[in-house]
Structure formats: structure tokens, C-alpha cells
Amino acid sequence: MRRVLARAVLALSRFKITGTPPEEPVCVMVAAPHTSNWDFILMIAMAWSTGVSPAWLGKEEMFWGPLAPLFRAMGGIPVDRRNPAGLAASVADRARRGNVSAIVIPPEATRSLATYWKSGFRRIAADAGIPIVLTYLDGPTRTGGYGPTFHPTDDVVADMDQIRAFYVDKHGLRPDRFTEPRLRDEEPALVADPA
């Protein structure tokens, strides 16, 4: 049923899928660019239409009220953005135990233009010993899908250079809102003096 619904959404939106879904049983899927409310619907549709049943992180405010059971059934994991300590470790632990498969994370963490991506996707993948799969939406070409898969290394800049190279021609649905893939961890001055 999910696959039929997902294919209907993609047909109506005229989005085409490129790339191959991850073969790894457990992975972190980077969902970017994250520039519109439609991103969530299209990304879930792409995953379901290719046989991937993702778990995804969403702000805890989404998990109140009548839609909360639906979001949980769709794989939603609530996140307290005011107190994110321990989130990466908790999600990594779920992955290690095999309780989730593809963990979808939008590292921009907002639909607005920001300065940095959040680094939780790298921490979860590294802590759980699972690969990162790059996924995307591109409004101008009406395509989305799967890109390269890699394991995070100790070289943050090299990992992020690989990510930047993949997303250089991906624009999202609202290109003016896409945050360049850059982590605060890449800025030596900020690492040395977080104040």
C-alpha cells in the first residue's frame, strides 16, 4: 500500500527518482536540500516507492495532537531541539540494535537559510558504525534520489568535501534557502575557541 501511495505522489508531483537505494541494512540517509514543507512528503514517497522504510527525526512539536500516531507509524522519532544532548547516541544505539534501518536526517535542521549543517548525522553514523547515504531533491530538474554511500572518517573536511561535491548542483525546491554543506567542526577557530 505504501509503495502504491508513494508512486501516486511522485506521479502527481512529476518527480523522477535517480540512483539506487542503499543495499546496507542500516544506514544514515542525508536528506538535503531541505528548503520546503514538501521535502518531507517527497522524500518519504521516494523512499517508500523504492522499498525503503525510513525512520526520520522531527521536532517534538509534530508529535502532539491527532497526527502524532500517524507520524510515529510513518517512522517518526521526536526530537527535543531545546535539549538535543544524547540524541545522536540514542539513535546510534537504536541502529546498532537493528531497531531502525534507514535513518533519514535533514542536517540543515531548518527550511530557512542557515550558516552550518548540524553534525548529528556524522556522529550517529560513526557511533553506530554504519554508512552515510546522500539523498537529494532538485526542484529545477524535478528529480530526487540516491547518491554515493560512504563511511565517515576522522577527516571531517574530506568527508564534507565529498558531500559538497555531490550537492553542488542540487538546488532543492526553494534554492534561495539551501544552506551550503558546512559543519561548525570544520572551522578551526571555532573548534579551538567555541565562544
Image: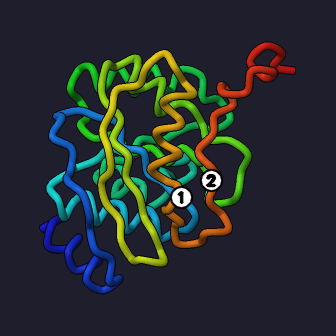
Question: What residue is at 59 percent from the left and 48 percent from the top?
Answer: 108
Q: Earlier in the sequence, mark 2 or mark 1?
A: 1
Disc 2, SS: loop
Given this view, does label 2 or label 1 mark the residue nearer the observer? 1
Callout 1: few (<14), some (14-19), or many (20+) C-alpha neighbours within 10 Å?
many
Q: Is residue 130 left or right of residue 163?
A: left
Rendered image: mark on residue 34: 1
Q: Which residue is mark 2?
A: 110
Q: Nearer the viewer, residue 169 or 119?
A: 169
Q: Could you say where residue 126 lies in the image, as x and y percent from the top left?
A: 40, 20
Q: Nearer the viewer, residue 50 or 64?
A: 50
Q: Could you say where residue 109 lies in the image, as x and y percent from the top left?
A: 59, 47
Q: Nearer the viewer, residue 91 or 26?
A: 26
Question: What residue is at 29 percent from the left and 66 percent from the top?
Answer: 45
The amino acid type found where label 2 is placed reads Thr
Q: Could you say where residue 136 lies in the image, as x and y percent from the top left?
A: 41, 58
Confirm or deny contact between disc 2 and disc 1 (CB under 8 A): yes
Question: What residue is at 55 percent from the left and 68 percent from the top?
Answer: 36
Q: Is residue 30 left or right of residue 18?
A: right
In the image, residue 76 above or below residue 42: above
Question: What residue is at 20 percent from the left and 26 percent from the top?
Answer: 98
The amino acid type found where label 1 is placed reads His
Disc 1, SS: loop
Q: CA distance from mark 2 to mark 1?
A: 7 Å
Q: Quadrant of residue 22?
A: top left
